[in-house]
Image (cartoon, rainbow, N blue to C red):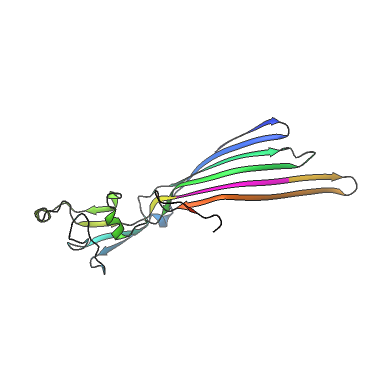
Amino acid sequence: TGGARFLPTPWLMLRGSVATGQLPPTLRQLQSDQSVVENPSVPVPDPRRPGRTTTQDGPYILLQGGSHRIRQEAGRTISLGVVVNPSGRSGPRFSVDYSRIDTRREIVDFPLGVAGLMAAEAAYPERVVRAPLSPADAALGLTVGRVVSLDLGMINAGGTVVEAVDFDLDWTVQTTASGEFRIYGAATWQPTFRRRAQEGVVWVERVGY
């Protein structure tokens, strides 16, 4: 975290700060559930082995839930503000602060199922493990071995952007007859709160919904 403030005049203060942080995965997000798929109710074609399904030549291991591949989530906050009458003496103290929070590599569920992963294997090569190409497969004209493991565990793909503007007023009025009066109030305007489940997809705006 780093910050600074500047007073160009006694009645005006400018301030700003930048902070970064990381959030490690939880134990649940690291724990993977493993099962053996032998005879699925709906066979899934293997695009790289034309005419064959993922279980036609043997079962495969399916990994779901958490994953040991996920990394820490990363976040950054930027804040800029203006304070009028920062000392709060002989008049109202008024401030306006803008902040932006940007989180990356959020841990989310893998967005594809088995069929989707098989169709997008080139984009997730580490999630599809295949056996070596056997002589029998080569004789059939195939170029890759059968699937032995598929990983549908969690992935670092989500993101969130939040923007907010905070207003704050504080005014203490001294009177000789009736004592001290304090007028204060605060308000926040949130123009943006958008999220996405994975990179390359459209952001979903949450403000107003």
Which quarter of the rendering shows the N terminus?
top right
Residue 153 occupies which quadrant of the picture?
Answer: bottom left
Front residue of 156/166: it is 166
Q: Is residue 177 left or right of residue 112?
A: right
The residue depicted at 50 percent of the width and 45 percent of the height is 102
Q: Is residue 112 above or below residue 169?
A: below
As displayed, is residue 161 above or below residue 117? above
Looking at the rendered image, the quarter that the C terminus falls into is: bottom right
Q: Position of residue 191 (x, y in %)?
A: 57, 49
Residue found 42% across the figure and 52% down from its top: 107
How far from the left and from the top, in percent, is residue 65? Answer: 37, 59
Which stretch appears magenta? 159-169
Residue 58 in the image, given as x and y percentages of width and height: 19, 62
Q: Residue at the bottom extreme?
A: 41
Relative to residue 153, is residue 95 drawn left or right?
Answer: right
- Counting every numbered tag in the picture gives 0
Query: In the image as oriented, which residue stretches furthest toward the top?
Result: 8
User: Toward which corner of the image does residue 152 lie, by quadrant?
Assistant: bottom left
Main secondary structure found in the magenta portion: strand
Reply yes or no: does residue 168 show up in magenta: yes
Q: Residue 141 location, x and y as percent?
A: 11, 53
**Res 39 → quadrant:** bottom left
Which of 196/39 is in front? 196
Q: Is residue 186 magenta?
A: no
Say left or right for 30 vs 5.
left
Residue in the picture at 26% in, 53% down = 128
Does 171 sit left or right of 123 as displayed? right
Residue ranking furthest to the right: 177
